[in-house]
Image: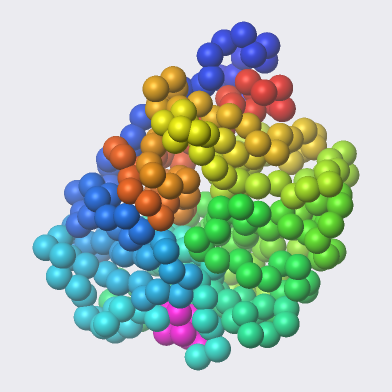
Amino acid sequence: MAGLVSNSKKRAMPTFPAPDTSLQPYFGAAHSYAARSYLPGFNGGTAGRTIMIQKNNTNGHVRQYNIDGVEITDGVWNGGMTVAEGAGSASANNWVGFWMDNADSMLYMLASNNSTNPDTLYLSKVNEAGTVTAIGNAQLAQASHDNMYHTSYGTQGKFRRLGGDGSGNFSIYNSYGAGGTAAHGAPYRGVDIQINASNGALSYSNIMPATFGDPYYLVGITLGPTDNNIIGGFSNYSSPVSDGPYGGIANTSNGKALYQAYMGSFHTNGVLHGSAVPDPVRWRGKYVFTGAGQAFGSQIFDENAIHTWLDQVAEYYGLL
């Protein structure tokens, strides 16, 4: 817990990190378009390119543009990559999550078929040239974990790689279940769904330890886990919006948690601001906040800096 101090809640709310512009310039980097996320292109690829993901659509086409805003037509990028094309299966019908890997220079994708019961998850990857590799698919163990979408920021965490860029299996949190493969209900310890990077096989474990129990599921768990096992994020705004966001925060080691915690505001501690809840995607070692509304100011922040801030917020509230 380097850099942390004993919690007393006598100091100010921790300051939000400074923006990170190291992946700029690229088309759409100003984040001027509500409901469309313009994200930096592939590491080692053509300079200035961007990947566009729709934030107001669970199954919209994913597109690639050059610095002039001209759409790329190589491979599956021609006309935009559909869910079925990206997953390598005509059965896939919704996007669940994205991870742009800075080491592999691949966009990893998690998609679903919500016509099966429970839903079926598909793991795949695509490169800049538009070549898709379907890695594997598996049906969820529990229907309570259905209906995960990349636009969700309530009970669902963000698709992430456990070893960081270039290493390990993938994972996504779902706090709706009682624990593991159990159906939804108390004690709402949630499930960490791990996706094997080689074949798409699924395994399950609890998010929260046996020391945690609650009559309602955790919300806003889109950030982390940090090295100190803190998860949290934004789930809503105060009123007025300028007063800043709030969301859940929890310690997955000791079971301490808050359902809704005030995270500060742009005026008090520099928390990012927009017309919709800040909803991140994990992308090339950064968090890119891509809510389905108008963004104000920079939306890209270094992953380690965000995790340090989240640890400090947990300490501020006595969870760490």
Main secondary structure of the magenta stretch: helix
Q: Quadrant of residue 64?
A: bottom left
Q: Residue at x 65, y 36 (%)?
A: 260
Is-magenta flag for residue 41? no
Residue sitting at x 46%, y 32% = 240
- For residue 72, which quarter of the picture? bottom left
Please tell me which residue is depicted at 54% across the width and 42% down the height of the picture. 236
In percent of width and height, residue 102 lies at: 39, 56
The stretch in magenta equals: 83-89
Q: Is residue 279 visible?
A: yes
Residue farthest to the front?
A: 240
**Residue 52 pos. (x, y %):** 31, 64
Question: In the image, is residue 84 part of the stretch drawn in magenta?
Answer: yes
Q: Is residue 122 shown above or below 288?
A: below
Determine if residue 285 is in view. Answer: no
Q: Position of residue 4 (x, y in %)?
A: 60, 19
Q: Quadrant of the C terminus?
A: top right
* Residue nearest the viewer, comparing 98 with 239: 239
